[in-house]
Image (cartoon, rainbow, N blue to C red):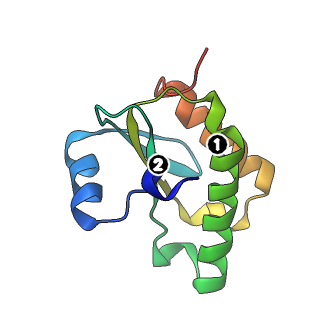
Amino acid sequence: MDINNRLRKDTQFRKVYKKGRSYGNSLMVLYVYKNKLDYNRVGFSVSKKVGNSVKRNKVKRRMKEIYRLNVDKFKNGFDLIFIPKKSTAESSYLDIQSAMLHLLSISHVLKK
Protein backbone atom coordinates (compact mmCIF):
# COMPACT_ATOMS: atom_id res chain seq x y z
CA MET A 1 0.00 0.00 0.00
CA ASP A 2 1.50 3.27 -1.11
CA ILE A 3 1.09 6.40 1.02
CA ASN A 4 -0.81 8.10 -1.82
CA ASN A 5 -3.31 5.27 -1.90
CA ARG A 6 -4.88 5.97 1.50
CA LEU A 7 -7.92 7.99 2.41
CA ARG A 8 -6.83 10.06 5.38
CA LYS A 9 -8.76 13.32 5.56
CA ASP A 10 -12.25 13.62 7.00
CA THR A 11 -13.39 15.41 3.83
CA GLN A 12 -12.31 12.43 1.70
CA PHE A 13 -14.24 10.01 3.92
CA ARG A 14 -17.35 12.24 3.91
CA LYS A 15 -17.32 12.46 0.10
CA VAL A 16 -17.26 8.65 -0.22
CA TYR A 17 -20.01 8.25 2.40
CA LYS A 18 -22.21 10.87 0.73
CA LYS A 19 -21.73 10.08 -2.97
CA GLY A 20 -20.61 6.44 -2.93
CA ARG A 21 -22.60 3.20 -2.92
CA SER A 22 -22.61 0.87 0.04
CA TYR A 23 -22.52 -2.92 0.10
CA GLY A 24 -22.75 -5.08 3.19
CA ASN A 25 -22.55 -8.60 4.51
CA SER A 26 -22.52 -10.16 7.98
CA LEU A 27 -18.98 -8.98 8.83
CA MET A 28 -18.54 -5.56 7.24
CA VAL A 29 -19.78 -2.71 5.07
CA LEU A 30 -17.97 -1.39 2.00
CA TYR A 31 -18.45 2.08 0.53
CA VAL A 32 -17.33 2.49 -3.11
CA TYR A 33 -16.97 5.71 -5.06
CA LYS A 34 -15.41 6.25 -8.51
CA ASN A 35 -12.55 8.70 -7.95
CA LYS A 36 -11.55 9.47 -11.59
CA LEU A 37 -7.91 8.62 -10.78
CA ASP A 38 -5.85 5.79 -12.28
CA TYR A 39 -5.36 4.16 -8.88
CA ASN A 40 -7.45 3.11 -5.89
CA ARG A 41 -7.49 4.77 -2.50
CA VAL A 42 -8.57 2.84 0.59
CA GLY A 43 -9.68 3.72 4.10
CA PHE A 44 -10.51 1.61 7.14
CA SER A 45 -12.93 2.88 9.78
CA VAL A 46 -13.14 0.69 12.89
CA SER A 47 -15.76 1.78 15.43
CA LYS A 48 -15.39 1.46 19.19
CA LYS A 49 -18.33 -0.97 19.01
CA VAL A 50 -15.88 -3.56 17.63
CA GLY A 51 -14.01 -3.69 20.94
CA ASN A 52 -11.12 -2.19 22.85
CA SER A 53 -8.08 -0.72 21.09
CA VAL A 54 -6.30 -4.09 20.93
CA LYS A 55 -9.23 -5.73 19.10
CA ARG A 56 -9.79 -2.73 16.82
CA ASN A 57 -6.12 -2.61 15.80
CA LYS A 58 -6.03 -6.38 15.21
CA VAL A 59 -9.06 -6.15 12.90
CA LYS A 60 -7.56 -3.16 11.08
CA ARG A 61 -4.17 -4.90 10.62
CA ARG A 62 -5.87 -7.99 9.20
CA MET A 63 -7.98 -5.94 6.79
CA LYS A 64 -4.95 -3.94 5.60
CA GLU A 65 -2.96 -7.13 5.00
CA ILE A 66 -5.82 -8.77 3.07
CA TYR A 67 -6.12 -5.63 0.94
CA ARG A 68 -2.35 -5.52 0.33
CA LEU A 69 -2.16 -9.18 -0.73
CA ASN A 70 -5.12 -8.87 -3.13
CA VAL A 71 -4.58 -5.36 -4.55
CA ASP A 72 -3.54 -6.72 -7.97
CA LYS A 73 -7.01 -8.29 -8.37
CA PHE A 74 -8.83 -4.92 -8.26
CA LYS A 75 -9.93 -2.57 -11.03
CA ASN A 76 -8.47 0.93 -10.73
CA GLY A 77 -10.22 4.25 -10.14
CA PHE A 78 -12.11 3.69 -6.89
CA ASP A 79 -12.19 5.06 -3.36
CA LEU A 80 -12.96 2.23 -0.94
CA ILE A 81 -13.89 2.38 2.75
CA PHE A 82 -14.17 -0.81 4.78
CA ILE A 83 -16.17 -0.67 8.02
CA PRO A 84 -16.10 -3.87 10.10
CA LYS A 85 -19.10 -4.84 12.23
CA LYS A 86 -18.98 -5.97 15.86
CA SER A 87 -18.80 -9.68 14.93
CA THR A 88 -15.57 -9.14 12.96
CA ALA A 89 -13.51 -9.02 16.18
CA GLU A 90 -14.21 -12.72 16.86
CA SER A 91 -13.83 -13.81 13.23
CA SER A 92 -10.86 -15.65 11.76
CA TYR A 93 -8.50 -14.21 9.17
CA LEU A 94 -10.04 -16.42 6.46
CA ASP A 95 -13.58 -15.29 7.35
CA ILE A 96 -12.54 -11.64 7.10
CA GLN A 97 -10.76 -12.31 3.80
CA SER A 98 -13.78 -14.04 2.26
CA ALA A 99 -16.08 -11.21 3.49
CA MET A 100 -13.83 -8.54 1.96
CA LEU A 101 -13.50 -10.36 -1.37
CA HIS A 102 -17.26 -11.01 -1.43
CA LEU A 103 -17.99 -7.28 -1.01
CA LEU A 104 -15.43 -6.34 -3.67
CA SER A 105 -16.95 -8.83 -6.09
CA ILE A 106 -20.59 -7.69 -5.62
CA SER A 107 -19.46 -4.07 -5.98
CA HIS A 108 -17.74 -4.95 -9.30
CA VAL A 109 -14.31 -3.76 -8.11
CA LEU A 110 -12.72 -7.20 -8.56
CA LYS A 111 -11.35 -8.02 -12.01
CA LYS A 112 -13.08 -10.93 -13.70
Q: Residue at x 73, y 59 (%)?
A: 91
Amino acid at dot 2 = Val
Numbered badge on residue 54: none
Viewer-proximal residue among 4 and 68: 4
Estimate how packed mark 2 is, as few (under 14), some (14 to 19) or many (20 or more) residues with alpha carbons within 10 Å.
some
Q: Residue at x 53, y 51 (%)?
A: 28
* Rendered position, 53 above or below 58: below
Q: Residue at x 28, y 39 (%)?
A: 20
Q: Residue at x 61, y 43 (%)?
A: 100
Estimate how packed mark 1 is, as few (under 14), some (14 to 19) or many (20 or more) residues with alpha carbons within 10 Å.
many
Give the number of marks: 2
Q: Position of residue 73 (x, y in %)?
A: 64, 29
Q: Left or right: where does residue 14 sit relative to residue 55?
A: left
Q: Position of residue 45 (x, y in %)?
A: 45, 64
Residue placed under numbered mark 2 in the picture: 29
Residue placed under numbered mark 1 in the picture: 99
How far apart in space, not on screen, are marks 1 and 2 (Cα)?
9 Å
Which image quarter: residue 57? bottom right
Amino acid at dot 1 = Ala
Disc 1 vs disc 2: Cβ atoms closer than 8 Å?
no
